[in-house]
Amino acid sequence: MRGSDGERAPRRTVLRNGALVACVGSFLVILAACGGGGSSPDWGTLEIPAATDVVIGVIGEEGVPPTVRTQVRNGLDLALTDTYELLGHRVRTEHAAGSCADAVLDLLGTEGLVAVLVVACGDDLAAALSMLAEARITTLLAAEHGPLPVDDAPVLRLTWSDADAAPVQGRFLRSVLGVESLVVVRSQSSAARGASEAFRLGQAAGGVDVIGERTLQPGDDPAAIAGDALVGGVDALYVALEPEEALRLAEALRVAGFSAAVLLAPSASDPALFGLRFDGAAAGVYLTRVHIDVGESEEFDAWRRRYAERFQITLEIDDLALPVYDGVTALLAALSRTQQPEPDGTLQVERYGLFAALRDRGGDGVGGLLRFNEDGEREALVQVDFLQVQGAELVPVG
């Protein structure tokens, strides 16, 4: 159906994709512009008649923490406040509920649909992206951080991936905590599987040996996992569960007397949730917080003040509102650049032209340059911070 800022931890940044990729990408763009890149793929054309809205679909809002849903909607609100009309057409969103696959089916019949914003689909992501790829609809990912399950899909990730955080986590475990070996504890979800796979691959840089993996089955008692960990005698656990599951496991580990380090995956690290449980049960647990490093600028400071005034919320460093705002704003700018309305106001949107214009040029976002590589991954400085539950607060460490 449709429908405080605190002290920041020491910075650990990773430049995704590097200068070589940027140089190669620039060369390819120049080559294509000079006629050496071959003809563009024919993805068909979307006709938007005069007086018909330009529509951005939104899926995957169900099952995510309320804070995530609010952040995404706030980013959309500001983006469409700034660009509420484009080339004589009103711009609006269409939110589709239900599973992501069902939501895509619901959206595909929407007149004027130029793109879809995916919040988080979990196990349903592959099916949803496959349908969007078949329809050649530009797709933006907001809170999906795992490996993309569909090749050659018109998908652009607005934030970071698990692969960005994994090497930094490994170095933190080895250099700061002195961990040499650990066991991964994860759920059966695709998000947890992706996080654990990225973590394993990233440990070569950190020198931490992953000696085993425990999968938490639905209905499993976290205390049983705690017992397994004690028997294994490991230095640490890496936990890729839902935040509520991670909290229950942390409490069970402390009750069982587990004294080794416990590091939560980014998807399991909910500072708001752990901040409510300062009863000692989760003491010592380390949270991973990841975000695009926006740096310092007058434009960002002004946008941050605007956000606080409009929503009465202080913008946190990992708030999704900003990348969503930048992504949607860049999408609409790309649409405007590639269009010449017909005399009656009709738009003829070449689907590949729109996607390529956004991927290859991106935009000068409030949160920094919005650039993507050929795989749709954002090229950006990614900051990874670590927080530890200590007494009655979350303390930056590292």
Image (cartoon, rainbow, N blue to C red):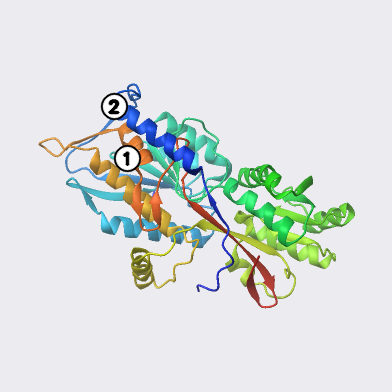
**Secondary element type, mark 2:** loop
**Location of mark 2 (residue):** 34
Residue at 28% across, 38% down: 111
First in residue order: circle 2 vs circle 1: 2
Looking at this rendering, what residue extends furthest in the right direction? 231
For the C terminus, the quadrant is bottom right
Give the total number of marks visible in the rendering. 2
Front residue of 47/138: it is 138
Name the kind of residue labelled 2 in the image: Cys
Q: Which mark is residue 230?
A: none
Mark 1 sits on what residue?
114
Mark 2 surroundings: few (<14), some (14-19) or many (≥20) residues within 10 A: few
**Where residue 113 sits in the image (x, y, percent)?**
32, 40
Measured as percent of width and height from the top left, residue 57 is found at 37, 45
Which element is circle 1 on?
Answer: strand
Considering only vertical position in the picture, is 151 above or below 391?
Answer: above
Q: Amino acid at mark 1?
A: Val
Q: Position of residue 126 (x, y in %)?
A: 54, 36
Q: CA distance from mark 2 to mark 1?
A: 28 Å
Rendering coords of residue 67 (x, y %): 50, 62
